[in-house]
Image (cartoon, rainbow, N blue to C red):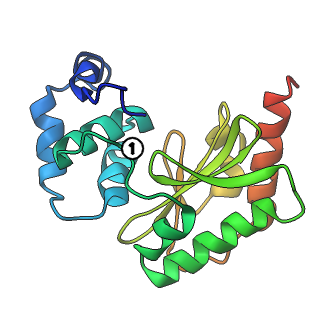
Amino acid sequence: MAPADGDRTRYWPAIEARYGSPMSRWFDEIAALDGRPYGEQMSRLIDGFGFSRAHANAVVMYCRGSASSRRVDSPDAYLAQVDPVAAGTVRRVLDALTRGHPGREVVIAWNQPMVKEGDDYLLGVSVAARHITIAPWGEGMMVRFADRLDGYVVNRKTFRVPLDWDVDEALLDDMVAVRVTEVAGG
C-alpha cells in the first residue's frame, strides 16, 4: 500500500536491489504501456519481472503521478472498467470462492479484487489486455499445484488464464483450502 505521506520514492533502493536494475529501467517499462489500464501495467512488472504487488504498485502509481494508490472503490467499479468477457469470468471466480462461505468477502486491495477471510487474504484476481492473472496467497502454491497448472502460464506466485476461462472451481477451492489451513497454523 502507499505510504501515508505518499512518498513512493522510499521504495526505490529496495526495488533496485531486489530486481537488479536502476529505477529508470522500471519507469521505461511502464512508459512503454502509457495509457494502458492499471492492471496491465501491474501485470507487466509482477508477471514479467517477479515484482511484489507493493513494489509494482509503487512504480506504477508513481509513473501515473498519483499520491494515492486507490483507483477503484469496489469490486463492481473494478469490473466496470475491464473487458466484459473478463468481468464475467472474474465474477464467476469470486462467486465460486465466496458461495457457501459467509466469513469470506471480496474487497479491493492493491487495486484489484481480493477474496479475504477475516484479516487474511486468500486469492487475488486482476485483468490484463489478453489474460486474467490469478494470485493465490500462500507459500509455494505454484509448486504445490504444478501438476494441475499444466497448460497455464505460471509465474512465481501467479498463473494466467484466458479472459473467457471455464472456471476450474475445484482448483480454486483447493488452493484456498491450503491457504485457510496455512493461516490456521496447520
Give residue 86's position: percent from left, percent from top.
50, 76
Please tell me which residue is depicted at 59% across the width and 70% down the height of the picture: 90
Quarter of the figure that contains the N terminus: top left
Residue type marked 1: Ile
User: Is residue 42 shown above or below 86?
Assistant: above
User: Is residue 138 shown above or below 107?
Assistant: above
Quadrant location of residue 180?
A: top right
User: Is residue 13 shown above or below 90?
Assistant: above
- Relative to the observer, which residue lies in front, 27 or 77? 77
Would residue 162 appear left or right of 119 to someone viewing this image? left
Q: Which residue is mark 1?
A: 46
Please tell me which residue is depicted at 64% across the width and 56% down the height of the picture: 149
Please tell me which residue is depicted at 60% across the width and 75% down the height of the picture: 89
- Relative to the observer, which residue lies in front, 77 or 116? 77
Q: Secondary structure at mark 1?
A: helix
Quarter of the figure that contains the C terminus: top right
Give residue 67's position: percent from left, percent from top.
25, 39
Task: Please indicate, yes or no, whether residue 172 appears anywhere in the rendered image.
Answer: yes
Task: Please indicate, yes or no, whether residue 52 appears anywhere in the rendered image.
Answer: no
User: Is residue 68 shown above or below 31?
Assistant: above
Would residue 149 appear left or right of 102 to someone viewing this image? left
